[in-house]
Image (spheres, rainbow, N blue to C red):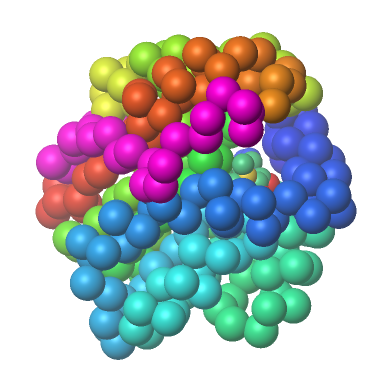
Amino acid sequence: MTEIERAASAEFDRWAEAGRGESMERGHAGVVEPVLDRWNLNDHSVLVDVGCGNGWAVRRALERGAGRCLGVDLSAAFIEEARGAGLGEFHVASGSALPLADGVATHVLSVESLYYYPDPQAALAEWRRIAAPRCELGVIIELFAENRGSAVWAEVLDIHAWLWSEVRWAEVARAAGWSRVRTERILQPGPLKSEAEFTVSAYWPSYQHYLDYRSAGALAILGVRGDTP
Ligand SMILES: C[S@@+](CC[C@H](N)C(=O)[O-])C[C@H]1O[C@@H](n2cnc3c(N)ncnc32)[C@H](O)[C@@H]1O
């Protein structure tokens, strides 16, 4: 394990112990569901969620009819919580060295995770290794350079995070061997908080940051495993 991964594993064990899994589900589901909607998961689908946290997206994919769903995460505490929910298969492992066979996945999902990895391109290449032909890739991140509301997170997080542009993320996915790579913005559903409902914190230094975050949306990096890298 690299130094960056060791720090991430310890930090996310703390997040799990502080009960942050459920709030991440509430915060992220609205920008992940539109991707799951498009995938039309069925009995033959094998979905792998890399950096799965407490495994909520694995459970939602199973509820949508996916035949097999696996989650992988560096944090042993999050994986223990995921296993405790009783649905899906979970592994404690680096997202850059998956304990999975070549070509096993029909869908690779990753939510708010890839910018923590020591080498995101190497991780994306590893995900292509486990991808079956025509496997769909869906990487969803809210921390990217064009999102002026969230960019401050890269400074206040206690661990390393890459703050890259939308174009760079797409280039890295292509360089890792994914085909038909494109990016989209997905807006959080639901009403905006009013300024009176908003609380200032290190992550949200002003109401304007929150408004900028909501208008930028989440970045989805989408691709497919073609026949050739
Ligand atoms: C912000 S949380 C998101 C969790 C989950 N995807 C969700 O939406 O609730 C980021 C997750 O990525 C995991 N992670 C960070 N670096 C990782 C790595 N190199 N390999 C695997 N998982 C990693 C963390 O342990 C953590 O669970």
Q: Position of residue 99 (x, y in %)?
A: 57, 62
Q: Is residue 201 left or right of residue 120?
A: right
Is any atom of residue 189 visible in this view?
A: yes
Relative to 126, say whether 153 is above or below: above
Q: Determine the residue positioned at 42% across, 42% down.
A: 191
Can residue 164 be seen in this snapshot? no
7 with respect to 194 (left or right): right
Residue 119 in percent (x, y) is at: 52, 28
Residue at screen point 23% across, 35% down: 184
Residue at image point 85% right, 45% down:
14
Residue at the location (67% across, 58% down)? Answer: 22
Quarter of image, res 93? bottom right
Could you say which quadrant of the image residue 36 lies in?
bottom left
Residue 155: percent from left, percent from top? 67, 12
Farthest residue toward the front?
196
Looking at the picture, tell me which residue is in the foreground, 65 or 51.
65
Give the residues in magenta. 172-198
The answer to whether residue 210 is magenta is no
Task: Using the image, determine if residue 94 lies above or below residue 81.
Answer: above
